[in-house]
Image (cartoon, rainbow, N blue to C red):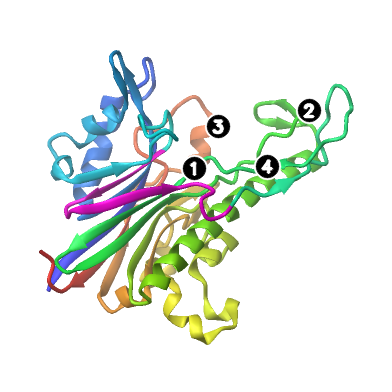
């Protein structure tokens, strides 16, 4: 039997912009120790920004600096890319690092779930013209990698679902942080919810495709879901029999590993004095037989609402890393 540790960590806009405070070096001094403590074999990262350098396509240079002199520097690595595949995205890339070989990887955005159409009802336009239905597209793709363990394959899916911040509505904002009407805010919140659940739907469709090929597939879905385990986006991905009413789908249920953590310690983000579990590792039932324990490294987690209340930013992320440990046979 071999130990396998899988972790997910939102790095909160890891970047190296000129004049940024705290500096990348200040952030690395804190975050690198967190990464070493994870001791992960597979690490899913969110909010990794790209950097530009003359004569080169945009690359993950800040991440390279963070991983330098750690075991992760030698791991296999894949990330999300621009639509043409030429370079990484400017902001909020997803990254998968693996001690074991990554056989193949893909990214999906509106591949399984086309963008829905919606007509905005609270917009205030200068001409007063009636709004037409437009596509509601989510910005962030799904990153899927197939990792090889001896004669077995693990499907790793890395996610960053849309935040709870409301989507801007034309004519409904006084300034960046102030809404003109409660109705405008409500519709913006609804649009963000639609995007978040749409991403979750597309993820569940990908999971079902994997189960169609093998109902005993080893699947882990990691990332920042911006939702707790009992909220709609996570429930959509889990596919509980209590929700589908179909016992024949029991083998396709995805289980949140953090349920084995005491409720008092089960939070990965702290907001307005309240802990919330927004980062998850969901595993297929076939992996549950090998599951041992979970960890959330939230001992020093700051209240992220305070960071937005002042100009002072924290060097550490506002999310805690989450880890699940397994004992699997025959890992090469």
User: Mark 1 vs mark 4: which is more N-terminal?
Assistant: 4
Measuring from the top left, give residue 88's x and y in whole percent: 36, 32
Q: Quadrant of residue 121?
A: top right
Please name the residue that numbered disc 3 is placed on: 309
> Marks 1/2: CA distance?
25 Å
Measuring from the top left, give residue 111's x and y in whole percent: 51, 51
Label 3: how many residues lie within 10 Å, few (<14), some (14-19) or many (20+)? Answer: few
* Residue at horizontal 19 percent and vertical 72 percent from the top: 327
Magenta stretch containing residue 215, yes or no? no
User: Mark 2 vs mark 4: which is more N-terminal?
Assistant: 4
* Residue at horizontal 57 percent and vertical 51 percent from the top: 196
> Marks 1/4: CA distance?
15 Å
Please name the residue that numbered disc 2 is placed on: 171
Q: Secondary structure at mark 2?
A: loop
From which residue to which does the magenta span run? 93-113
Residue 135: image tag = 4
User: Mark 4 vs mark 3: which is more N-terminal?
Assistant: 4
Label 1: how many residues lie within 10 Å, few (<14), some (14-19) or many (20+)? Answer: many
User: Mark 1 vs mark 2: which is more N-terminal?
Assistant: 1
- Name the mark nearer the viewer: 2 or 3: 2
Label 2: how many residues lie within 10 Å, few (<14), some (14-19) or many (20+)? Answer: some
- Name the mark nearer the viewer: 2 or 4: 4
> Marks 4/3: CA distance?
33 Å
Q: Nearer the viewer, residue 184 or 216?
A: 216
Residue 140: image tag = 1
The relative height of residue 211 versus residue 322 in the rendered view (above or below) is below
């Amino acid at each position: 039997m071999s130990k396998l540790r899988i972790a997910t960590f939102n790095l909160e806009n890891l970047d190296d912009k000129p004049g940024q405070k705290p500096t990348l070096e200040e952030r690395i001094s804190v975050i690198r120790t967190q990464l070493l403590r994870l001791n992960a074999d597979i690490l899913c990262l969110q909010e990794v920004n790209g950097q530009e350098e003359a004569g080169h396509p945009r690359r993950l240079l800040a991440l390279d600096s963070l991983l330098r002199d750690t075991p992760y520097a030698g791991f296999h690595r894949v990330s999300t890319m621009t639509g043409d595949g030429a370079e990484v995205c400017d902001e909020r890339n997803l990254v998968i690092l693996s001690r074991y070989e990554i056989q193949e990887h893909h990214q999906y955005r509106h591949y399984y779930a086309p963008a829905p159409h919606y007509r905005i009802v609270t917009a205030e336009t200068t001409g007063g013209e009636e709004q037409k239905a437009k596509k509601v597209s989510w910005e962030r793709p799904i990153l899927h990698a197939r990792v090889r363990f001896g004669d077995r394959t693990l499907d790793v899916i890395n996610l960053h679902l849309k935040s709870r911040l409301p989507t801007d509505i034309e004519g409904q904002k006084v300034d960046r942080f102030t809404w003109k009407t409660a109705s405008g805010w409500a519709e913006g919140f609804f649009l963000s919810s639609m995007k978040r659940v749409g991403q979750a739907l597309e993820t569940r469709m990908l999971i079902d495709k994997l189960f169609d090929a093998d109902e005993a597939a080893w699947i882990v879905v990691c990332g920042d879901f911006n939702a707790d385990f009992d909220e709609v986006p996570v429930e959509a991905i889990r596919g509980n029999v209590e929700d589908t009413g179909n016992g024949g789908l029991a083998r396709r249920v995805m289980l949140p590993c953090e349920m084995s953590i005491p409720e008092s310690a089960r939070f990965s983000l702290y907001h307005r004095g309240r802990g919330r579990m927004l980062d998850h590792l969901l595993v297929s039932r076939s992996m549950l037989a090998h599951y041992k324990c979970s960890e959330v490294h939230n001992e020093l987690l700051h209240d992220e609402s305070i960071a937005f209340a002042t100009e002072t930013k924290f060097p550490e992320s506002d999310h805690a890393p989450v880890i699940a440990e397994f004992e699997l046979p025959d890992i090469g």
